[in-house]
Amino acid sequence: MEVDPEFAEGLDDLERFSHVILLYHLHRAGLLRMKVTPFLDDVPRGLFATRAPTRPNPIGISVVRLLRREGRTLHVSDVDILDGTPLLDIKPHAARFGVDGPVAGGWLDDVDDDEAERRGTREKPTSLR
């Protein structure tokens, strides 16, 4: 991810975190739909039980692994964002402020790793401005 020069100073100290939270505008989301069929499933689900981009407010959020920082470029992995997506904010991910205890994954807990791999994982690098 490449951050505009005017925001570069704000990246100082970020490299000490293993993960960052990205907040972005889903600029290619399309029309709002309250029922969607997620790419990992064949069953229509309620929009708010998915990560589909067709939302009332087209705002996306992802937690990604921060591999390294080079100036105003952040090298990340585990990205599920389209290349060129407008980035709104970056926040450090800190376990101290996360969920304590087990987390239920809803219908996603029913999708095994082989099926997720067959349907296609999204791990391509991206450049956001």
Image: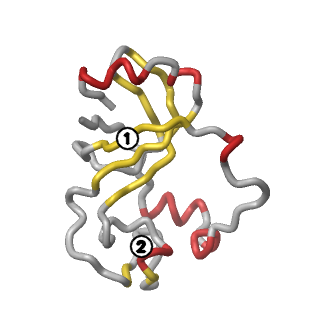
Location of residue 90 with respect to 40 vertically, above or below: above
Q: Residue furthest right?
A: 101
Disc 1 crowd rating (10 Å Cα; few below 14, some 14-19, many 20+) is few
Q: Is residue 9 left or right of residue 66?
A: left
Q: In the displayed image of the protein, which residue is found farthest to the top?
A: 71
Residue at 41%, 77% in the rendered image: 47
Q: Quadrant of the N terminus?
A: top left
Residue at image location 43% in from the left, 53% down from the top: 61
The residue that mark 2 highlights is: 38
What residue is pinned by disc 1? 89
**What element does badge 1 sit on?**
strand
Rendered location of residue 79, percent (x, y): 42, 44
Q: State the CA–CA distance, disc 1 to disc 2.
A: 26 Å
* Discs 1, 2 touching: Cβ within 8 Å: no
Please count the marks in the image. 2
Decide which of 39, 32 is in the foreground and name it: 32
Q: Please give the name of the residue rendered at 42% of the width and 85% of the height, measured from the top-left corner.
A: 44
Along the horizontal axis of the image, is 96 left or right of 111?
A: right
Of helix, strand and loop, which one carries label 2?
Answer: loop
Name which residue lies at 71% across and 41% down: 96
Residue 116: percent from the left, percent from the top? 51, 62
Task: Give 98 or 35, whichever is nearer the viewer.
Answer: 98
Q: Amino acid at mark 2?
A: Pro
Residue 17 lies left or right of residue 9; in this view the side is right
Left or right placement of residue 124 versus residue 100 in this view: left
Report the amino acid beneath label 1. Asp
Residue 87 in the image, given as x and y percentages of width and height: 30, 42
Q: x%, y% of residue 75?
A: 41, 27
Which part of the image, by quadrant, shows the C terminus?
A: top left
> Is 110 above or below relative to 72?
below
